[in-house]
Image: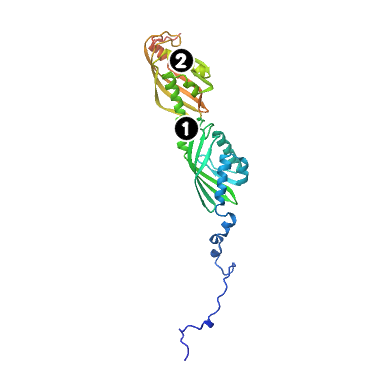
Amino acid sequence: MAPSPHRAAPRSEVPAEAPINTSNRGFPHFLACPCLTGTAIMEENMPGENKALIRRWTEEIWNQKSMAAIDEIVAAEYIQHIPPLADQQGIDALKQFLVVHRAAFPDGRFAEDELIEERDKVVLRWTFHGTHMGEFMGVAATGSPTEITGTTTLRIAQGKVAEHWVHWDSLGWMQRAAAVTTALIRRWLEEVLEKGNLEVVDEIWAKDGVFAATLIPEVRGPDAVKRVAAAIRTAAPDWHYSLVGEPVAQGDRCSCRYTVTATHRGDLLGIAPTGRHYSHTATATFRMRGGKIAECWGDWDALGVMQQLGVAPAVGQLKVAA
């Protein structure tokens, strides 16, 4: 009887399995892709090596401020993205930024909060602590302790840092820095001029700090500033101020408007006490340096005060010489 056409052939009739051809001929290219086998990645960096590299980046470059470390672990084609600054390329760009950062926060240190690694990317979540001793991103030194949080993403190529993206709480930091400046101004107006705590001048005024105001000659240094403040307090022991709006700040400068109410109880610019109440508006502009007042210019309505004290004619009574 002839074998059924559907009958399985004997095992001896089955052809031997051909060896798999892993050459380019006859083998699908996508199966030969090294990204599936992991060989390309393993050849460049073993797992954990990129994390170790970024720990060097944090400790040696940013905490130890080492320029030599930049040359060792940063690629020549390095690119940095640090908003709101413009993107920059090259090792020199990183070195220049490190110089600025080191001057602004000489004792600054980054602490690792979390480190995530996958292939050629490492993500570092960090907290920074330092004292703000120099200008940074247009914000004058406040001399105050600083805490900043942020996240940095780094791309690694051939064992070096090739690209760097960072996002941090820049707005919050600037707001806190502005608050420090505003606090200095409030201490000058409230604690020194309003309450008469002259010793505060030593805390908030630079050693070579300058003060000048309408009808008050320029003086320099904390002791001279104390004498001016004492004279204001003698003339008007109940001197009281109120800010008008919020101070306006840019860089190392800050300006504020305020109103003053007082009673004339002592000598005021050579005018004997009248016992009269008076009020005036004023604007004070400050320049800060190292967390202290380096200069203060005050402009106030001196004519209006003299009119209220009865020693100057009203504007409508002023006579202009022919």
Secondary structure under the numbered disc 2 in the rendered image:
helix
Mark 1 residue type:
Ala
In the image, residue 284 lies at what x, y percent?
46, 22
In the image, residue 194 lies at what x, y percent?
41, 19
Residue at image point 54% right, 83% down: 12
Q: Earlier in the sequence, mark 1 or mark 2?
A: 1
Secondary structure under the numbered disc 1 in the rendered image:
helix
Mark 2 residue type:
Ala
Q: Is residue 44 left or right of residue 216?
A: right
Residue that mark 2 sits on: 230
Q: Which mark is residue 122?
A: none
Is 12 in front, or is 267?
A: 12
* Residue 111 vertical placement versus 38 (above, below): above
Residue at image point 45% right, 25% down: 185
Residue that mark 1 sits on: 177
Residue at image point 56% right, 49% down: 52
In the image, residue 186 lies at what x, y percent?
43, 25
Q: Looking at the image, is mark 1 or mark 2 nearer the viewer?
A: 2
The tally of labels here is 2
Are there few (<14), some (14-19), or many (20+) residues within 10 Å of tag 2? some
In the image, residue 60 lies at what x, y percent?
58, 42
Instruction: Tell me the quarter of the picture where residue 273 sits.
Output: top left
Are there few (<14), some (14-19), or many (20+) residues within 10 Å of tag 1? many
